[in-house]
Amino acid sequence: MPSFFSSRLKTLRIKKKLSQKALGKMLGLSDKTISAYENGRNAPDFQTLVKISKIFDVSVDYLLGATDIEKSKTTLKEYTLKDIPVFDEKSILNEEAIERIKLPIWAECSYGFIVPDDSEEPVLSKGDVALIKKGPAMDGDLILWKGEKIQIRRLYIQGDDVILKPENSKYKPSIEDVLKISSSILGVIVGRWQKFK
């Protein structure tokens, strides 16, 4: 569902004559991720939101629809926080959160999942909280899925097969049946949250 952010991002990108691919390259993201931002399927994490505001020389408040003044001062204290549950590999199966975190209301996610290994380096590190949005996945999305164990993988659709590819090249991709994988997807990763160490 389009939001203030998605419509403003698209307007600013077109105004600056950037393709989705070009903007994605500037942000270190795929053009599919930019498309997902613009159609309201995904929302960026805070660090990416700040990068976008700098690229277009507008405030975060403007991007999120808190003001109609492009160069207003960003006042993040005005954003309502929501409480989301966080799970690990064991607790997600019985839906008993091991902790809760507070995120700005614009962070469109349903729950968090603690990354169990380094298979998604450099996108997600072990111990990060992957922010998950429940719902369908598209080709190129980073997903949380339940196979033999709970894993995060990049989803690629090829005919009747799905390739689940880890970001870290030391791990091998797997090939799954489209019908099998569709019922195993637990959500799409829309961002990450890190604790200071």
Image: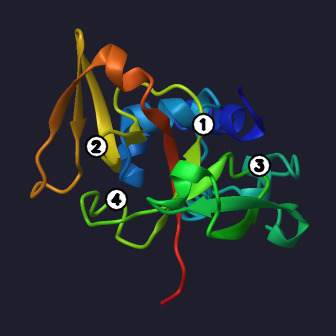
Q: How far apart are the two marked residues, 3 and 1, measured between alpha carbons? A: 22 Å
What residue type is disc 3 on?
Leu
**Residue at image mark 2:** 148
Picture coordinates of residue 31, whole percent (x, y): 39, 34
The crowd level at tag 3 (other Cα within 10 Å; few <14, some 14-19, many 20+) is: some
**Residue at image mark 4:** 123
Q: Nearer the viewer, mark 4 or mark 1?
A: 1
Q: How far apart are the two marked residues, 3 and 4, measured between alpha carbons? A: 24 Å
Front residue of 6 and 92: 92
Q: Quadrant of residue 23?
A: top left
Q: Which of marks 2 and 4 is in front?
A: 2
Q: Nearer the viewer, mark 2 or mark 1?
A: 2
The crowd level at tag 1 (other Cα within 10 Å; few <14, some 14-19, many 20+) is: some
**Residue at image mark 3:** 64
Tell me, yes or no, whether the two marked residues, 2 and 1, touch with CB atoms within 8 Å. no
Front residue of 164 and 81: 164
Residue 18 seen anywhere in this rendered image of the structure: no
**Residue at image mark 1:** 134
Q: Which quadrant does the N terminus fall into?
A: top right
What residue type is disc 1 on?
Lys
Among the two numbered marks 3 and 2 on one chain, the one whose residue lies closer to the N terminus: 3
Q: Nearer the viewer, mark 3 or mark 2?
A: 2
Residue that extends furthest to the bottom in the rendered view of this protein? 197
Q: How far apart are the two marked residues, 2 and 1, measured between alpha carbons? A: 20 Å
What residue type is disc 4 on?
Val
Among the two numbered marks 2 and 4 on one chain, the one whose residue lies closer to the N terminus: 4
Q: Nearer the viewer, mark 3 or mark 1?
A: 1
Picture coordinates of residue 2, whole percent (x, y): 71, 28
Horizontal relation, residue 173 to residue 131: left or right: left
Q: In this view, does 17 lie above or below 49?
A: above
